[in-house]
Image (tube, rainbow, N blue to C red):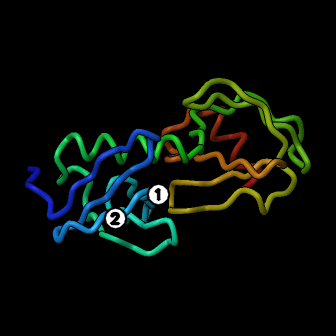
């Protein structure tokens, strides 16, 4: 259930977020930062000024009025890029470097995995894979992948 926050959030004519605190002090160019971007993306979000100083901590996005929530979500989406792997359909080799062909939430892609150390376990079921260009791919829950995808992934764990 959302309640009236003790701040205002708008977007200026240049598309930048503007934060006004409860005393009327204004900050332009505010940036939302997720505290737990992978494990709990909608909880623990800081709004920081252009110098990186925290202006306010938001425990849960769902607690904000919908217009504020949409402003923050839009800003986060414009800055974050981490495709989520939904399916692995080919791995060129079980030794590295290898070329992976995957289906993500943003479409099909192939990338090069330089080394096994580029597959990092985040939680008991989630992994982050970094390709040769530094792009991070997320596997949110390896148990939800199809059998063939899990079998391919297992070779690198």
Crowd band around label 2 with a 10 angstrom C-alpha radius: few (<14), some (14–19), many (20+): some
For label 2, the SS is strand
Percent of width and height locating residue 4? 9, 55
Report the disc number at residue 93: none
- Looking at this view, is 23 or 122 the one in front? 23
Marks 1 and 2, the one that precedes in the sequence: 1
Left or right: where 4 falls relative to 75: left
Crowd band around label 1 with a 10 angstrom C-alpha radius: few (<14), some (14–19), many (20+): few
Look at the image and tell me in which quarter the C terminus lies. bottom right
Left or right: where 140 falls relative to 23: right
Compared with 65, 28 (above or below) is below
Compared with 12, 51 (above or below) is below
Left or right: where 152 falls relative to 32: right
For label 1, the SS is loop
- Looking at this view, is 91 or 36 the one in front? 36
- Looking at this view, is 136 or 154 the one in front? 136
Percent of width and height locating residue 112? 85, 42
Toward the top, the furthest residue is 107
Report the disc number at residue 44: 2
Find residue 93 and report its image quarter.
top right
Which residue is painted at 16% across and 46% down in the image?
65
Percent of width and height locating residue 70? 30, 40
Which residue is painted at 26% across and 65% down in the image?
59
Q: How far is disc 1 from disc 2 in space, using C-alphas? A: 9 Å
Percent of width and height locating residue 135? 72, 47
Judging by the rendered image, the residue that carries numbered circle 1 is 37
Which residue is painted at 23% across and 40% down in the image?
67
Which residue is painted at 84% across and 49% down in the image?
132
What is the tally of numbered marks visible in this picture?
2
């Amino acid at each position: 259930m959302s309640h009236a926050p003790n701040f205002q959030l708008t977007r200026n004519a240049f598309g930048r977020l503007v934060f006004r605190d409860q005393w009327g002090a204004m900050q332009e160019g505010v940036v939302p930062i997720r505290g737990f971007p992978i494990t709990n993306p909608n909880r623990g979000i800081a709004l920081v000024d252009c110098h990186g100083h925290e202006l306010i901590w938001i425990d849960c996005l769902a607690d904000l009025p919908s217009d504020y929530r949409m402003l923050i979500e839009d800003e986060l989406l414009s800055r974050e890029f981490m495709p989520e792997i939904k399916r692995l359909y080919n791995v060129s080799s079980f030794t590295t470097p290898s070329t992976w062909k995957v289906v993500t939430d943003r479409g099909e892609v192939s990338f090069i995995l330089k080394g096994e150390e580029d597959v990092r376990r985040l939680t008991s079921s989630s992994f982050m894979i970094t390709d040769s260009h530094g792009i991070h791919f997320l596997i949110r829950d390896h148990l939800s992948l199809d059998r063939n995808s899990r079998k391919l992934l297992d070779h690198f764990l």
